[in-house]
Amino acid sequence: MAEDRITQAAQALLAARQGAPKAANLGAAAPTSMAEAFAIQRAVLAGIGGSIGGYKCAAPPGKDPSAAIMNGATIRPSPATWQMPREGRIGIETEVAFRLARPLPARATPYNREEVLDAVAAAFPVMEMVESRYQDPRAVNPLEAMADNVAHAGLVFGADVPNWRSLDLPNLAVKQTAGGETQVERIGGNPSLDPVTPLVWLANFLPTVGLHLEAGQVVTTGSCTGLLWVPGKQRVTGGFAGFGEVAVDLA
């Protein structure tokens, strides 16, 4: 039964979070739909005593979209200090994020781009912290990845950008450094091309799994730098020209 798979998958992912050996995959407990993947995410969130602070999402052209819950306890302002995972390295991605001013509850007709943007309070730079609960996250299927919150570990956010509505968000110049050395510097790079695209998709997807965007929640919209693995004991910065910067000190 689906309920049994959800419970078994959540227990395996919780165990890995608590220090047990990581599994190669979820095996027979793997979700068979996005709804099951989200049910596993919510069971894990309950298991760690967390709450929904927002979501990460992506809607790349020609590929399946994805989304994951972000635990509010791991959404922190910049500059932040971050404890390193047991592997001694962590993935970091520089992204564009939004904060909701008001909820977008379920309704009969889909929200359009203008309606979703009208519900946004602010936009700002973030760095997503990435840590998988699988031995090799590249070896699991997309639904298993979603069950593990698409390897989400946390989010460090920068200051609100006052003039964000007048900026060319798809073509911002992004830069990420580690220990003072540039890792990536380029124009654009969002996997959905425009960071607003996955936000609109998410607003219409969440009601299909019994959720919806709520006021105050943060939505981050996919890496503009790609996934960059970084060892500890250094400062990592990420940001966009004219859109601010984020800093995290890796302990």
Image: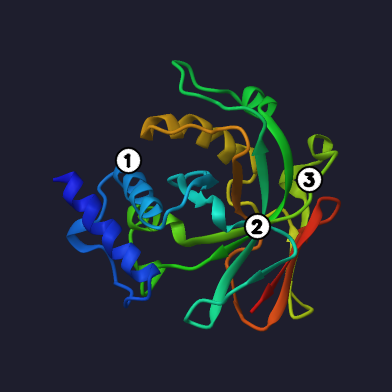
The x and y percentages for residue 53 are 55, 46
Q: Is residue 175 left or right of residue 213?
A: right
Q: Name the N-terminal-most of marks 2 and 3.
A: 2
Left or right: where 217 falls relative to 51 = right
Label 1: how many residues lie within 10 Å, few (<14), some (14-19) or many (20+)?
some
What amino acid is labelled 3 in the image?
A: Asp
Mark 2 and mark 1: span between their CA atoms? 28 Å
Q: Is residue 7 above or below residue 249?
A: above
Q: What residue is rendered at 32% in x and 68% in y?
A: 15
Which residue was labeled with disc 1?
35
Q: CA distance from mark 2 to mark 3?
A: 14 Å
| Mark number, residue 160 | 3
The spot of residue 79 in percent (x, y) is 75, 64
Disc 3 is placed on an element classified as loop
Instruction: Please say whether residue 15 is visible from this viewpoint.
Output: yes
Which label lies toward us, 2 or 1?
Answer: 2
